[in-house]
Amino acid sequence: SELTLATSPPELVDKCIGSRIHIVMKNDKEIVGTLLGFDDFVNMVLEDVTEFEITPEGRRITKLDQILLNGNNITMVCSVEVK
């Protein structure tokens, strides 16, 4: 099978719909969840979400059913699964 490369950020994110992704945020939070959809600003809707945050007391883990994530706060997106 031939590997196809995405040529734009929306194309790359589109390939991740339905997959687990790992997101690094500007505020040092990290989020892992299943990508349901996104818009032109790369705002994302995720489900089955785990949020990791480093606090002075240690690492805080929060579980959430579904979130809308503001694309302006995203630093990096990595696919957790290979389709």
Image: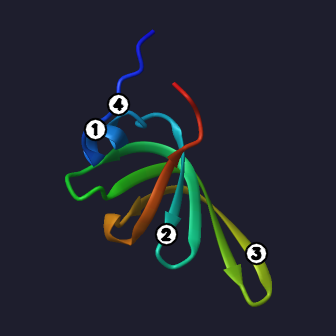
Q: Residue at x 70, y 85 (%)?
A: 55
Pointer 4 or 2: first along the chain: 4
Identify the secondary structure beneath mark 3: strand
40 sits to left or right of 34:
left
Q: Nearer the viewer, mark 4 or mark 1?
A: 4
Q: Residue at x 52, y 48 (%)?
A: 78
Q: CA distance from mark 3 to mark 4?
A: 35 Å
Total marks placed: 4
54 sits to left or right of 27:
right
Q: CA distance from mark 3 to mark 2?
A: 15 Å
Tell me, yes or no, whether the two marked residues, 4 and 2, touch with CB atoms within 8 Å: no
Asked if 41 appears above or below 59 in the picture, the reply is above
Residue flagged by tag 1: what amino acid is it? Glu
Q: Is residue 48 visible?
A: no
Horizontal and vertical percent position of residue 44: 36, 54
Residue ID for mark 1? 11
Residue ID for mark 3? 59
Q: Nearer the viewer, mark 3 or mark 4?
A: 4
Q: CA distance from mark 3 to mark 1?
A: 33 Å
Pointer 4 or 1: first along the chain: 4
Q: Which mark is residue 62?
A: none
- Quarter of the image for residue 53 reads bottom right
Say few, some or many: other residues with alpha carbon within 10 Å of mark 2 (under 14 / 14 to 19 / 20 or more): some
Which image quadrant: the N terminus?
A: top left
Residue flagged by tag 2: what amino acid is it? Met
Horizontal and vertical percent position of residue 56: 75, 90
Say few, some or many: other residues with alpha carbon within 10 Å of mark 4 (under 14 / 14 to 19 / 20 or more): few
Identify the secondary structure beneath mark 2: strand
- Quarter of the image for residue 15 reads top left
Q: Is residue 1 visible?
A: yes
